[in-house]
Structure formats: C-alpha cells, structure tokens
Image (cartoon, rainbow, N blue to C red):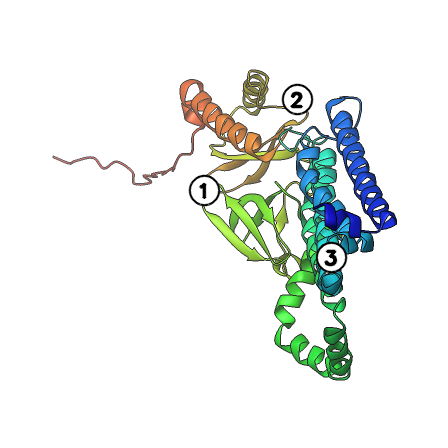
C-alpha cells in the first residue's frame, strides 16, 4: 500500500481528493437543503420529495466523480477511461431523466392538491386534473425518447449508423405514418382533448345512450364509469368526431325534469304549492329553480312538467325521483279524480215504449 501511495503523483492525489470532497459536500448540501425545505410548511416542496430525488442525485454525483481523470490515474484505470466515461455519460443521462420525471410528479402533486375534484363545484379542478394527466403522459414519452436518443448518440458507431439511415428515414416515416395513422390520430385527439377539453375528468356524459362519468383519459382511449358500475371504453377520436352529451361542460349544476300525466280536473295551483313544499323540505334542492308548467294537452290527459335544479347530476337524479313520488302520492291521497281516466259516454236516444192491453 505504501509503495502504491509513493508512486502516485501528489498533485493527482490532491485533485482526486478535492473532486471527491467537493462532490460529497455538494451532494450533502443539496440533500439537507431540500430536506429542510420539505419539513418547513411555508415552503412548497413536499416532505417526501427528498426521498424521491435522493437516489437519482446520488447517481448523478457519482457519475461526475468517476469521470475525474485524476481518479483514473489514482486507481490505475487509465486503460479503462473510455469505458468509464461512456458509463458515466449514460449514468448522467439516466439520472437527469429520472430527476426531470420526479420533478414533474412533484409539480403535479403540488398543483393538484390545491384543487379538490370531490367538491360539488369542481369545474376548475377537473380542468386542471385533465390537462395534467394527459400532458404528463406526453411529457414522459417525449423525455424518454430524448433520453434514449441522447444515450444512443453518445456512441460514435451508432451516430454513423444514424447518418447512413437518415436518407431512408423519410420513406420509412411515410410508411409508418400510413400503417399507424389510427394510432397517431388517437394520440393527436388526446392532445386536442387536453387543450380544448370537450370532456374533463369526472364529467357527466351520455355516450352511445349510456349515462356515466369520465373516469380516465389517456392519449388513446377514455374510460367511462357507467351508472351501473360497468365501464365503457371509447377511443379518444370518438369525442372529436361524434356528437355526445356533456352535462357538466361549463358547470356542475343541472336542471332536473319530472313529467306527470293527469286528468283535466287536476288543480294546478295546489300541485304547484305541493311542489314548492317538497323542494323546500329536502337538501337535494339548491333553491334556484322551482317551476311547474302544463307542457301538453292530449285527448285523454294533460302533461305537466316540474322543473327543478340541483348542484350536480347525481343529486338531480335523486331529486327527480323524490319529486315524482311525492307528487303522485299527493294526487292519490287528495285528488284521486285528477289521475288519468278513460271516459266512456253512453247515449240512449230511444224513447220508452208503452204496452197496450
């Protein structure tokens, strides 16, 4: 050991030691700084952020350390310098990519935690959540492709192959474009949905005659949670190319309607009073809309529409069910003659005849 230390140049030893100490101090400073910021509630960095970045940071600093020429000379690794440098380059690309993706996850968590999609008025929260979910996937794919390209281009042999294949890349791109046009169209539709937002996470929609909520939005497909717990999987292009109903496009509140068919003898004023009483007695009603109208008159019955409002579509559904039941019960109990009837009029124009004796 002493012979090895004597044969090592003092300047080389100083450079290697200085490099190691500098990187160690830089790593520890970064580690404890982020850890302190994460433990202080007045800073934005979450507490678990340091756990996520500690390993990629360590790999990054180690990759810088092993690139030191003085360290190679100190450890007699000059013959392996090329391999070590290439390994270090790959580790740097890998760790930086990892740090970028972790930073994206942390930024997403910081922003989304300020918006609660479970509240009744959650339009803005659903917009932010939808954009981040779709754009996050796009960003991850782009970063991964760039990292892979940077890693491959670090090798001279692969770089030469890339130059030789560049001339045929245009033709190959056209062929791939034609064969994968549906996939590319779906991805572009996903990007368009993220920007224009015809649908958002947790939107209430009617698609293919099915009522449900948007449960998941990806670049290529959308998952709709139907009211009976089934899942409807629809390609993203569907929402660009086909008409559909979105009950919560601009707001979560919605109007509910109840249609009742009655006899012509129904007392409209009493029915309006009963509707007001029913709505005032339930927390399902938001207190905004309370209307009862005669919308049609047919030969056998009168069509009455009760219009009411609720904070969201599930609440509106429950309110409609309640109002329909109460109004029918009110007519059955107080005005049974107002229920629909089928009338039959018998006319006897024959004069009574007298018997002769």
Q: Secondary structure at mark 1?
A: loop
| Percent of width and height locating residue 221 | 59, 56
Give the residue pinned by disc 3. Answer: 76
Q: Give the number of the disc on residue 287.
A: 2
Residue 290 appears left or right of 131: left
Whether residues under marks 1 and 3 lie with C-beta atoms below 8 angstroms apart, the answer is no
Q: Nearer the viewer, residue 57 or 267?
A: 57
Mark 1–mark 3 Cα distance, whole angstroms, equals 66 Å
Q: Give the number of the disc on residue 229.
A: 1
Residue 345 appears left or right of 179: left
10 Å crowding of disc 1: few (<14), some (14-19), many (20+): few
10 Å crowding of disc 3: few (<14), some (14-19), many (20+): few
- In the rendered image, which quarter is residue 272 located in? top right
N-terminal label among 2 and 3: 3
Q: Nearer the viewer, mark 2 or mark 3?
A: 3
Question: Where is 211 relative to 339, above or below?
Answer: below
| Percent of width and height locating residue 103 | 74, 42
Among all residues in the image, which is located at the extreme left?
A: 357
10 Å crowding of disc 2: few (<14), some (14-19), many (20+): some
Identified at 80% across, 51% down, the residue is 8
């Amino acid at each position: 050991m002493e012979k090895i230390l004597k044969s090592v140049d003092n300047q080389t030893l100083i450079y290697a030691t200085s490099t190691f100490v500098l990187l160690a101090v830089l790593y520890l400073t970064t580690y404890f700084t982020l850890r302190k910021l994460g433990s202080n509630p007045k800073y934005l960095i979450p507490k678990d952020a340091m756990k996520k970045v500690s390993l990629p940071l360590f790999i990054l600093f180690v990759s810088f350390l092993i690139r030191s020429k003085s360290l190679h000379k100190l450890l007699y690794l000059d013959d392996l310098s090329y391999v070590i440098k290439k390994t270090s380059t790959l580790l740097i690309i890998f760790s930086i990519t990892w740090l970028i993706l972790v930073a994206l996850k942390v930024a997403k968590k910081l922003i989304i935690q300020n918006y609660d999609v479970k509240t009744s008025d959650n339009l803005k929260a659903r917009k932010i959540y939808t954009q981040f979910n779709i754009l996050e996937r796009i960003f991850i794919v782009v970063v991964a492709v760039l990292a892979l390209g940077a890693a491959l281009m670090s090798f001279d042999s692969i770089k030469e192959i890339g130059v030789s294949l560049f001339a045929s890349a245009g033709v190959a791109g056209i062929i791939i474009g034609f064969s994968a046009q549906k996939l590319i169209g779906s991805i572009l539709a996903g990007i368009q949905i993220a920007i224009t937002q015809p649908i958002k996470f947790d939107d209430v929609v009617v698609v293919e005659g099915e009522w449900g909520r948007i449960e998941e939005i990806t670049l290529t497909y959308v998952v709709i949670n139907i009211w009976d717990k089934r899942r409807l999987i629809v390609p993203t292009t569907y929402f660009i190319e086909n008409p559909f109903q979105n009950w919560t496009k601009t707001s979560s509140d919605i109007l509910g309607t109840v249609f009742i068919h009655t006899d012509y003898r129904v007392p409209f004023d009493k029915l309006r009073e009963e509707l007001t009483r029913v709505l005032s007695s339930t927390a399902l009603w938001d207190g905004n809309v309370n209307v009862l109208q005669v919308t049609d008159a047919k030969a056998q019955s009168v069509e009455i529409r009760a219009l009411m409002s609720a904070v969201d579509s599930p609440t509106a559904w429950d309110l409609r069910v309640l109002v329909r039941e109460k109004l029918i019960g009110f007519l059955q109990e107080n005005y049974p003659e107002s229920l629909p009837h089928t009338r039959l009029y018998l006319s006897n124009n024959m004069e009574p005849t007298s018997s002769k004796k």
